[in-house]
């Protein structure tokens, strides 16, 4: 008869093996976490390195604009120093930083800016008395922040169209605000002669009108900070 011998109970050996396996897994997880943190910090540091400003000439006026502000589709004109007749920028209010994917989440309003070399164009303010006052329905009414409003909307129409202007200065602030329907956003368009032959136009949400003085001053100073000549 062949004796049958049962295997010896492993007892503590099983627990030791389990502890060892768990320790190896924890060590591996800690190593992976450390590598992920290293590369995350490295990529963030790399992303914070500012790119070289784009050298852009709009007519005779030169600008050095950080590339994150430029949204013009004329990319081929912006890759090197060259003369262009038009460039479009975007920035956020109130900080006037570049637009990003987080701008709407942070509740920032986007300001779109156009710079165009267009000598001889008649200003919006020059058309106020001979043109817009005649088209207005009714007289001027008081608006936000000391502004006056002229209603250009069609009677019974769904679109809203108005001129808002500062009555205290002959060549002061003026903008045209339009809303395509009752459910769409109302956008105001402001045009300024930034320098000889250079138009600066920017658009903003109508809800910013009460702060028009600070907005106008900040936008002009921001664009002036990009100017090189």
Image (spheres, helix red, strand yellow):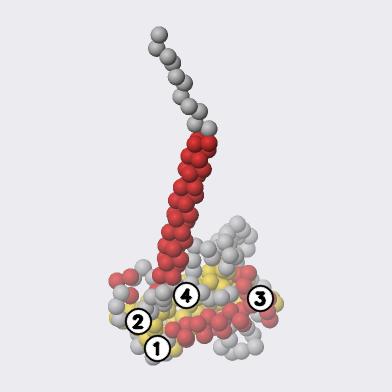
Q: Nearer the viewer, residue 58 or 143?
A: 58
Among numbered discs 4 and 2, the one appearing first in the sequence: 2
Q: Is residue 21 visible?
A: yes
Q: SS of the residue at dot 1?
A: loop
Left or right position of 146 against 7: right
| Res 122 seen here | no
Density class for disc 2 (Cα within 10 Å; few <14, some 14-19, many ≥20) is many
Q: Which mark is residue 228?
A: 1
- Rendered residue at 49%/66% (across/down): 100
Marks 3 and 2 sit apart, C-alpha to C-alpha, by 35 Å
- Circles 1 and 2: CB distance less than 8 Å? yes
Image spot of residue 128 (x, y percent): 56, 81
Q: Dots 3 and 1: beta carbons under 8 Å? A: no
Observer-nearest of 144 and 14: 14
- What residue lies at 66% left-to-right and 80% top-to-bottom? 147
Marks 4,3: beta carbons within 8 A: no
Q: Is residue 21 left or right of residue 180?
A: left
Reading the image, the residue beneath label 2 is 55
Relative to 163, residue 59 above or below: below
Which residue is denoted by mark 3 in the rendering?
210
Task: Please identify, in this view, whether the residue under mark 1 or under mark 4 is nearer the observer.
Answer: 1
How far is the residue under mark 4 from the one under mark 3?
20 Å
Q: Nearer the viewer, residue 160 or 15?
A: 15
Image depth: mark 3 or mark 1 in front:
1
The relative height of residue 38 versus residue 94 in the rendered view (above or below) is: above
Name the residue carrying label 4. Answer: 113
Disc with the residue nearer the chain's start (1 vs 2): 2
Among the two numbered marks 3 and 2 on one chain, the one whose residue lies closer to the N terminus: 2
Left or right relative to 17: residue 133: right
Mark 1 nearby-residue class (10 Å; few <14, some 14–19, many ≥20)? few
């Amino acid at each position: 008869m062949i004796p049958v011998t049962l295997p010896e109970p492993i007892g503590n050996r099983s627990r030791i093996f389990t502890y060892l396996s768990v320790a190896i897994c924890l060590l591996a997880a800690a190593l992976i976490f450390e590598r992920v943190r290293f590369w995350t910090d490295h990529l963030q540091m790399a992303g914070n390195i500012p790119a070289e400003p784009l050298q852009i000439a709009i007519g005779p006026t030169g600008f050095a604009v950080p590339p994150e502000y430029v949204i013009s589709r004329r990319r081929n004109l912006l890759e090197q120093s060259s003369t262009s007749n038009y460039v479009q920028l975007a920035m956020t209010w109130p900080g006037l930083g570049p637009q990003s994917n987080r701008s709407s989440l942070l509740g920032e309003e986007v300001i779109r800016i156009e710079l165009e070399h267009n000598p001889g164009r008649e200003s919006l303010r020059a058309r106020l008395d001979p043109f817009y006052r005649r088209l207005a329905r009714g007289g001027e009414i008081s608006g936000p922040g000391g502004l006056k409003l002229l209603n250009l909307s069609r009677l019974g129409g769904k679109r809203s169209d108005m001129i808002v202007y500062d009555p205290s200065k002959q060549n002061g602030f003026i903008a045209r605000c339009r809303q395509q329907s009752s459910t769409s956003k109302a956008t105001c368009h402001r045009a300024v002669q930034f320098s000889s032959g250079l138009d600066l136009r920017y658009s903003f949400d109508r809800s910013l009108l009460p702060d028009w003085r600070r907005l106008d001053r900040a936008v002009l100073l921001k664009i002036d900070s990009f100017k090189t000549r």
